[in-house]
Image: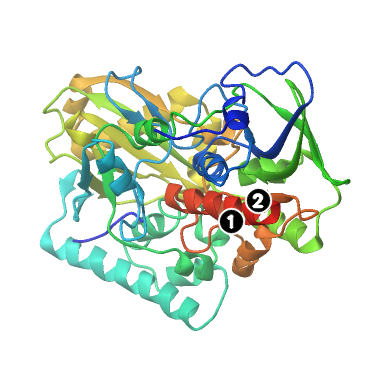
Amino acid sequence: MTMTRRTLTHSALATAALVGTGTTAKTTDTDVIVIGAGAAGLAATDAVMRAGHSVVCIEAMDRIGGRVFTDTTTFGVPYDLGAHWLHHIALNPFVDIGKSHGFTMYKQPDDMQAYYKGKPLNPTDTIALETEHARMFKALFDSAQAGNDRVATYIRQPQTEWTLTSEAMIGSLSMARDLENVSDLDWYIAEEGEDWFCKQGFGTLVAHHWADVPVTLNTTVTSIDADRDTVTVQTSGGPIRAKAMILTVSQGVLASGTLDIRPKMDSALVSAISDITLGSYNHIALQFSHGTIDTPADTWVGYHLTERHNGSPKGGAVLTNSGGTGLCYFEIGGGFGHWLESQGEQAMIDFALSEMSDVFGHDIKNGFIKGHASRWGYEPTVLGSYSGTIPGKANTRSALRTPIANRIFLAGEATSIGEQGTVSGAHKEGLRAAATVSALLA
């Protein structure tokens, strides 16, 4: 059954940007400040430099990449803590980027394996799951296509034995939120298509591609002031003054109010910041010895869910044998995922191992090596996973692009319309903001 998951030339001024030091001796003057070195910030910084303007990019973390980051030390193999799927390859530039750098890029297998009571689904149950998933999917599609923007809970009725499983696939494992917080229109406008993987890790690809972009790391921002004819940013390394700024912090950070931004934002922008929130979605990575779980590489496995917890389907799904390494990504999201994340990393690992043991047999524990879990909701520079609008507010994404004082421009996956929640969407939004700022400075 088919169920898919949804050498740079720098100007003299640009290369003068501090790389990785997190310190400045005095006020730095530049054409453009970019805050955040995730996919949007890196793309914007590169594009601004290519347009001939000086730029300083600052990042609070000790690395670049933001929510796309590959760890190679924990398991000794590539482990994407954040973005792993390269979504909708017809729109996504990163497969070609990866190939151009010599990375191994390959298509995600089409079919999902589903399990019921510890065994692969029999033909009757397979048809039942496919039928229920198709019904719920069509209900969402028809409603949104008719122009509705409402709470997606109506697709639960009438309920069958497979409603909860399909609900998780559509809601918590796709939108990073439960149906109570899913806008059917926001779900509808997200583009879907063929997904790919990068064997060396999506984060490795992004970090390699932007390795020559100058970034000042370990630098936090306390205030942004565009009240006058410049933008002044107060940072832990000292003040920076520029003609314009591109702000690429996560929607979670933006909504937290920790950034003191002046002048007062437009009311439409204030509303958009409230209406577009970050959901909860994490990887619980479990490493097994080769052959422990008998599935082909990169097989997406779902299983029968029967309970709710914290308003959410209790459980997840798992990408097995990632890249043929024996590493499995147990995926958890929505209200239950948020609760489990709050219990700490070990609780997340224990739950995932227990669920996988029920699906594949308790003997898999003999092949278990170790685990790790991402906890993006507790990462202070992110505060969540990826964005979704609250029901009834799907059209507010365009308002999130509203400039502040015509000098501060927001960009990131949350400002994308159609590729929200993706690295590709963030990348393109960084380019959009860079084009706007370059035109302003021309």
Left or right: where 150 falls relative to 2: right
Counting from the top left corner in percent of width and height, residue 5 is at 33, 54
* Residue 241 in the image: above or below residue 428: above
Name the secondary structure under disc 2. Answer: strand
Pick whichever of labels 2 and 1 is earlier in the sequence.
2
* Residue type highlighted by circle 1: Thr
Give left or right: position of 260 versus 98: right
Q: Quadrant of the N terminus?
A: bottom left
The picture places residue 144, in percent across and down from the top left corner, at 49, 76
In the image: residue 324, left or right of residue 56: left
Tell me the SS state at disc 1.
helix
The residue that disc 2 covers is 410
Q: Residue at x 54, y 28 (%)?
A: 214
In the depicted structure, whether residue 264 falls above or below residue 198:
below
User: For mark 1, what is the residue?
Assistant: 415
Q: Position of residue 52 (x, y in %)?
A: 58, 43
Q: Do residues under tags 2 and 1 come within 8 Å of each other at their CB atoms? A: yes
